[in-house]
Amino acid sequence: MTPEIAVAEKQTKRVAVVIVSLNRMTQLRQSLEMLGEGGVQAHQVIVVDNGSTDGSAFAGDDFPGVRSMRLPKNFGSTKALNIGLRTAESEYILFLHDDARISGESVTCLADYLEAHPEAYGVCPLLTDAAGNPVPQVSTLPAPGLTEPRLQIAGGEGEAIAAECVSGAAVMYTAFFIRALRQIDERYGDYGGIPDLCAQTRRAGKKIVILRNITAIHDGLPSPVSQSLLDGDRAAGTAVFLAKYHGFMASLLYRAKTALGAIFTFRFGVAAGALSGQKIDGSA
């Protein structure tokens, strides 16, 4: 190997693609295939497996250039993303769900937009289904009057659509912003990390935008985790978010109301999340 080639291989990639995966081997392989050989070579691709049991933990081994990190159990997406972030050595970081697919060229276009628009800290492709139809992608941030905002299809005019809060299926951030925060707040388990980044972006006076002319396919598959665990984790994450951005009393009232309603409807996982802050991995 010549010195010139060795230096080129050691150069830092401009974009890191961090994929958190759990028991979706087929979808993960499709996602890596759509990034393409050029995308894997052009970008740093990191797959963090959250304790899969279907063999998908080793799917990245079939794609030269992909770095695979295997966790012993499902710690939730927030901790898994942070593990991926600590490995990333790039100017821009794309968070990508394992059931989302985007081309390597489109990843480059997202980074180009952030480089040309310093008023934006985050950018997303327009999420569509396999037929090209837009799928729900934007919401408001959780607030005392609306603690469970649901994703909706992005609306608005122009090439770039400003959003208050976005799906974590495919969102790119400037790395210096993420590193300035040190990490995504690990008081969140599976739910809350991306809304928190959106809130931090807003607090910094910057924007998150969705680009209509750049698309990614999002299958939006049901989670392999039980709905009871997901609901409990969401309650815990919402309580953390409300305390952080709306104060202790807002969080306390949410915890009491949510736990009481959950107990009367026998949703004890939700009650545990609301009262104790129990996250998806069982920790509080």
Image (tube, rainbow, N blue to C red):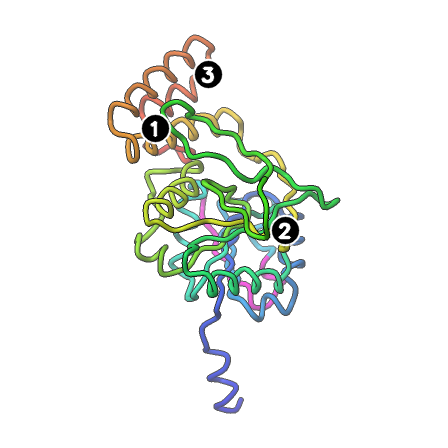
Sequence-earlier tag: 3 or 2: 2
Q: CA distance from mark 2 to mark 1?
A: 31 Å
- On screen, residue 68 above or below 191: below
Membership of 56 in magenta stretch: no
Residue placed under numbered mark 2 in the picture: 216
- The residues bearing labels 3 and 2 have C-alpha atoms spaced at a distance of 35 Å
User: Which of label 2 and label 1 is nearer to you?
Assistant: 2
Q: Which residues are magenta?
A: 60-73
Give whichever of 149, 98 is nearer the camera.
Answer: 149
- Quadrant housing residue 169: top right
Residue at horizontal 36 percent and vertical 15 percent from the top: 257
- Camera-near label (3 vs 1) is 1
118 to 195, vertically: above or below: below
Q: What residue do we see at 42% from left, 34% from top?
A: 141
Do the CB atoms of the residues marked 3 and 2 lie less than 8 Å apart? no
Q: Which mark is residue 138?
A: none
Residue behind mark 3: 267
- The answer to which of 164 and 11 lies nearer the viewer is 164
Q: Position of residue 146 (x, y in %)?
A: 42, 24
Is residue 63 within the magenta segment?
A: yes
Type of residue at label 3?
Arg
Of all residues, the one furthest to the front in this rendering is: 157
Tell me the amino acid under the disc marked 2.
Ala
- Quadrant location of the C terminus? top left
Circle 1: is it few (<14), some (14-19), or many (20+) Cα within 10 Å?
A: many
Check disc 1 and report its element: helix, strand or loop.
helix
Residue 239: mark in rendering: 1
Q: Position of residue 215 (x, y in %)?
A: 64, 52
Name which quarter of the figure residue 236 lies in. top left
Which residue of the protein is positioned furthest toward the bottom in this rendering? 2
